[in-house]
Image: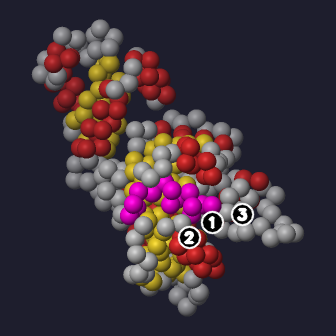
Amino acid sequence: MAQLKAGERIDYMYSDDLQIIQAADEFAFSLDTLLLAAQAKQFLKPRSLVADLCAGNGAASLYLAYQSLAHFDAVEVQPEVASQAERSVVLNHFENRVDVHLGDVKDAWHLLKKDSYDLVMVNPPYFKVPAGHKLNPDRKKAIARHELLINLDQIIAISSGLLKMKGRMVMVHRPERLGEIIAACSQHDLSVKVIQPYLSHRGDDSNLVVVVAKKHVAATGLVLKDGIVVHEADCSFTPAIEKIIHEQAKPAKYYYFYVLLCSDGSFYGGFTDDVPARVDAHNAGKGAKYTQTRRPVKLLYHERFPSKRQALKREYWFKHHERAWKEKFLRGHEVIW
C-alpha cells in the first residue's frame, strides 16, 4: 500500500484499475488532463518516448501508460505534487515506464535529452499575471494556473527543443490564447496541424482547446475539428466524454510478472499467464533452469498486466537490477521473506 501524507487520498481512473494519489484541497487532476491524454493517445506507438511537461501528479502519463507500451518522462516543479506522481507510479507498477523528474520545465533541456522525443504533452498554466491581479492565496494552485514560473512562449520553445523532427506537441489550453499559441509555434519550428475545441454545453462558445503541432514540417494543412460537447443538458457527461473517463478494453487474457524466493535465498523473476501453475512447474523442476537446483521455491509477489509484452518488460526490468535494489523493491511492496 502506498504511503499517504496528510490530506491525501487514493482516487481511481478506469474504475479500480488505475489508482492516483492526490489531495483535493491542494491539487487534483482535472478533465483537462484526460482530454489532453486522449488526444495524445492516437499518436503513441509501443516504442514512443513521451515528455509530459507541467505534469502535476502524473495523471496524463499514468492514463497513457495504462493503455500503451510507451515510455514517459514527467516533469513537475512542485515537490509535493511530484511526490504524489512518483508514489502513484509505484502504486500502479509503472516504474519501468514512467519516470518523474522534479524540476522547472525551463530546465527540461538539462533534465531530459533534446531532440529525442516523439511526443511532448503539455498542460501549462493558462493565465497571465497582469499587474495588480489578485492570485489564489494557495501558492500551489497559483503556480498551476498562472504563468508565475514560466510563460507560454518558453513552454513552446522547450517543447520544440525536446522533439525529434516530425515529432508532435499536444497542448491543452484556453481558446482565447490560441493566436499566441499559433504564433509561438511558428517561431519555434512547430506547425499547428489540429485544433480540437471542447464546449461545456451545445450552443456554448468553446472554453477549451487541444492543439496538436508538428516539428519541422510545412505550415499547411491545419484541421479545425468539430467541437466536442462535454455535458448533457442535465450536466451529466456526454457519451464521448464518458468513453474517455471510464471505458476500457478488457483483455481476454492477463499476463503476470512474479517473484520467487529460492531455497538458497536468491530471487527469481519471471512471467506467466497462470501464476499457481507456473509455481508448481518450478517446484516440479520444469519451470526454469535457474530454479531446478534451487527448489523448493516460494511465491513472494506478482503483478497483473493486460499484455504479454508488458509482463516481459517488467521481468526484464527486475532481472537487470542488483540484489539490494530487488530487496528494496520488495520491501516497498510490503513483501516479507
**Amino acid type indicated by mark 3:** His
Q: Which residues are magenta?
A: 153-167
Q: Gap in Å between the C-alphas at discs 3 and 2?
A: 23 Å
Q: How many marks?
A: 3
Q: Residue furthest bottom?
A: 203
Question: Element type at marker 3?
Answer: loop
Disc marking residue 187: 2
Q: Mark 3 against mark 1, which lies toward the viewer?
A: 1
Circle 1 crowding by C-alpha within 10 Å: few under 14, some 14–19, many from 20: some
**Amino acid type indicated by mark 2:** Gln
Q: Position of residue 241 (x, y in %)?
A: 46, 72
Disc marking residue 153: 1
Q: Position of residue 329 (x, y in %)?
A: 45, 27
Q: Position of residue 6 (x, y in %)?
A: 69, 40
Asked whether 94 falls inside the magenta stretch, the response is: no
Question: Element type at marker 2?
Answer: helix
Q: Nearer the viewer, residue 137 or 171?
A: 171
Circle 2 crowding by C-alpha within 10 Å: few under 14, some 14–19, many from 20: few
Q: Is residue 325 above or below residue 294?
A: below
Disc marking residue 146: 3
Q: Is residue 325 left or right of residue 141?
A: left
